[in-house]
Image: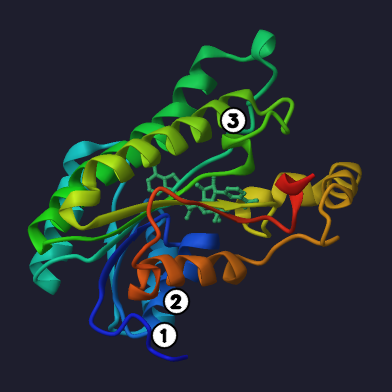
């Protein structure tokens, strides 16, 4: 590693597994210190044990404003400020469905975690970046933010479109204050979130068949883009949509 994030102070939500974990591990390997937020305390403890003292585990439910505010404050106190925020925590509710069969509770829970959770992370994260004089804010979106390519995942698609809308307006709002805001669009990536697809042979085959590169992505392949966007190499990148999807959205 070339230590592209030396001296950076980062905060990553959903950091106990999958893309968030891979991002935290890579950030640390590149020289950053990383506050890791998640509801999964055992997962956080595992990441902290694996990575060592570059990681600060902070149990936090991103839908609870007081918990997000407290976690951001704890990271700022430990590091003296923050330079990078990755609003990444998200869920795919097993009850998600076509809109005419979609339960209100499933819709609300999906929007709560995927959109309100990102909003709260950005709200308190941006305040910390402003106090540091600038930084990089990254939101994890999805191909479903852009296209109606996931029938039966209506709540998820709507929540992820919302994430992209928020990321774009923030890019415009905060550019003059030195904060770059970008969205990362991972394609089908082998994480806990993808387990339902992997477990269903027909669904898995169909999903992979739609990927020009012919295979699912690995969390580390998404984390590589996160590192770039967090680094000063991405100094002219804001308001961007960085697709890491094996070509799915190209066709
Ligand atoms: N895996 C994919 O194929 C894929 C594709 C496109 C987008 N994404 C997005 O990538 C992001 C990361 O997902 P992943 O694939 O790594 O899945 P994952 O399930 O491995 O990781 C998600 C993490 O978020 C945490 N989390 C869930 N709800 C939370 C809450 N309320 N507060 C705090 N933490 C919470 C979970 O505990 C988990 O550790 C999500 O936003 C997801 O929508 C994933």
Q: Is residue 93 left or right of residue 168?
A: right
Classify 155 as above or below 59: above
Q: Specify which label sits upstream in the sequence, 1 or 3.
A: 1
Residue 15 is situated, as x and y percent measured from the top left of the image, at 42, 61
Colour pattern of the rendering = rainbow
Give the percent coordinates (x, y) of residue 190. Answer: 68, 60
Q: Which mark is residue 157?
A: 3
Q: Residue at x 41, y 65 (%)?
A: 229
Badge 1 element: helix
Residue at the outermost bottom position: 2
Query: In the rendered image, is residue 117 in sight?
Result: no
**Mark 3 or 2, which is nearer the eye?**
3
Residue visible at 31% across and 56% down? 180
Q: Is residue 149 left or right of residue 87?
A: right
- Residue 32 drawn at (x, y percent): 31, 79
Question: Is disc 3 placed on a helix, strand or loop?
Answer: helix
> What residue is shown with label 1?
29
Kindly indicate whether the residue at mark 1 contacts the one at mark 2 (C-beta within 8 angstroms). Answer: yes
Quadrant position of residue 132: bottom left
Classed neighbour count for the residue bearing mark 1: other residues with Cα under 10 Å, few (<14), some (14–19), many (≥20): some
Q: Position of residue 49 (x, y in %)?
A: 39, 80
Residue 228 versus residue 200: which sits nearer the camera? 228
Which of the numbered marks, if any, corresponds to residue 25? 2
Q: Nearer the viewer, residue 158 or 239?
A: 239
Mark 3 residue's CB less than 8 Å from ligand 1? no
Toward the viewer: 8 or 234? Answer: 234
């Amino acid at each position: 590693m070339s230590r592209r994030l030396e001296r950076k102070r980062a905060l990553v939500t959903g950091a106990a597994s999958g893309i968030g974990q891979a991002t935290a591990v890579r950030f640390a390997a590149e020289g950053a210190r990383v506050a890791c937020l998640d509801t999964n305390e055992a997962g956080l403890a595992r990441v902290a044990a694996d990575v060592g003292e570059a990681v600060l585990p902070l149990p936090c439910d991103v839908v609870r404003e007081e918990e997000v505010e407290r976690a951001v404050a704890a990271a700022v106190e430990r590091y003296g400020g923050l330079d990078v925020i990755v609003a990444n925590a998200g869920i795919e509710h097993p009850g998600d469905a076509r809109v005419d069969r979609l339960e209100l509770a499933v819709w609300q829970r999906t929007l709560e975690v995927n959109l309100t959770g990102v909003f709260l992370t950005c709200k308190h994260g941006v305040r910390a970046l402003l106090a540091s004089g600038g930084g990089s804010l990254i939101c994890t979106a999805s191909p479903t933010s852009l296209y109606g390519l996931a029938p039966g995942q209506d709540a998820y698609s709507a929540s992820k479109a919302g994430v992209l809308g928020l990321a774009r307006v923030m890019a415009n709002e905060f550019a003059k204050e030195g904060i770059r805001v970008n969205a990362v669009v991972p394609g089908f990536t082998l994480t806990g979130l993808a387990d339902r697809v992997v477990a269903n042979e027909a669904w898995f085959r169909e999903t992979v068949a739609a990927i020009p590169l012919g295979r699912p992505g690995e969390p580390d392949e998404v984390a590589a883009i996160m590192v770039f966007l967090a680094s000063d190499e991405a100094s002219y990148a804001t308001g961007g949509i960085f697709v890491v999807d094996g070509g799915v959205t190209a066709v």
